[in-house]
Image (cartoon, grey):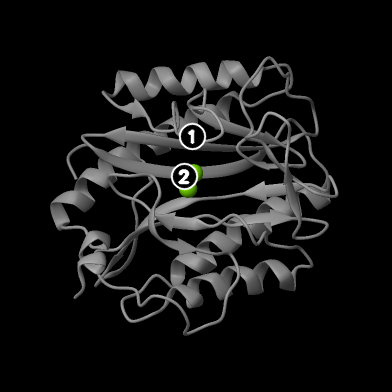
Amino acid sequence: MTSIDEQLIKTEVEINKMRKAGSVNALVLEEVKSMIKPGITTKELDTAAETIIRDHGGIPTFKGYPGPYPYPATLTISINEEMVHGIPSGRILKEGDIVSVDCGTTLDGFIGDSAFTHGVGEIGKEKKRLILVTEQSLYKGIEQMLPGKHIGDVSAAIQDHVESHGFHVPRKYTGHGVGKKMHEPPQVPNYGVPGQGLLLQEGMTIAIEPMVLVGTPKTRVLSDQWTVISADHSLTAHYEHTVAVTKNGPLILTRVRDEKN
Ligand code: MG
Ligand code: MG
């Protein structure tokens, strides 16, 4: 095993720490999801998220994250054509919007990273279909997270599911290894060829995150230098889990779990 491979492999103790961070992250997302309704501002959701993380002894991973300027919030909240990295603000959620919420929690030095998309009030059939296909593509990717498979198997499973429903995946934004740092190797594109790319091995921990666009795969960044939107302003959605490759199959680390386990 090369030294680069060694960095990618976590011990059982480390994976357990990631489960704890991931569990807090999942609690945050559950609470934020329950707060999504017409009239609430994205800043209110962000404040609630930070409070929950700090009450559990954690640190919001995204806050201060290096970029064009340090990321200013706990969550990224991306509405409608905004795909990822939307900055919480005084913007008020409206009936019929679809909202993607992404969060990272650092606890005891390890990170959980996960995301979901949810409708505000009543949303139409096509918006529901976009959200469902995106969520399904996440689980199609996770199913491939087995020792002996390759990154390309994960990528292709996501791409095939999304494109078979007439939607698109971006080329520039990918899933990633995660552990003590939020972005570790390898990158996990949402498109690819089965059997290609890095071999998956027991102990790898990866954030799988399908991003889906209705119109085309093209994206652009807004003048705030963080928010990524679909180039044609079509709707987008995003789901994410942090997952460990284990001999018993894929282990989702970003789920709420019992403290004792
Ligand atoms: Mg994320
Ligand atoms: Mg991520």
**Residue 20 in picture, x, y percent from top left:** 26, 40
Numbered mark located on residue 114 in the image: 2
Give how far across and how far down residue 194 sits, in percent: 52, 83
Residue that appears at 40% across and 49% down:
183
How far apart marks 1 and 2 lie (CA) works out to 8 Å
Q: Is residue 194 above or below residue 107?
A: below
In the image, is residue 233 above or below residue 37? below
Q: What amino acid type is highlighted by mark number 2?
A: Ser
Element under disc 2:
strand
Q: Which residue is identified by label 1? A: 29
Q: Is residue 96 in view? A: yes
In the displayed orientation, state which residue is furthest to the bottom. Answer: 195
State the residue in front, 246 or 72: 72
Q: Is residue 46 above or below residue 245?
A: above
Mark 1 crowdedness (10 Å alpha carbons): few <14, some 14-19, many ≥20: many
The local crowd at label 2, few if under 14, some if 14 to 19, many if 20 or more residues have their Cα within 10 Å, is many
Can residue 258 be spotted in the picture? no
Residue 233 % position (x, y): 84, 45
Pointers 1 and 2 in contact (C-beta within 8 Å): yes
Q: Which image quadrant: the N terminus?
A: bottom left
**Total number of numbered labels?**
2
Image height of 31 relative to 232, above or below: above
Of 116 and 73, nearer the camera is: 73
Instruction: Residue 239: give its label.
Output: none
Q: Name the residue: 22% across, 52% down.
A: 15
Cβ of mark 2 under 8 A from ligand 1: yes
On screen, residue 222 versus residue 54, left or right, reads right
160 with respect to 80 (left or right): left
Element on which disc 1 rests: helix
Image quarter hosting the C terminus: top left
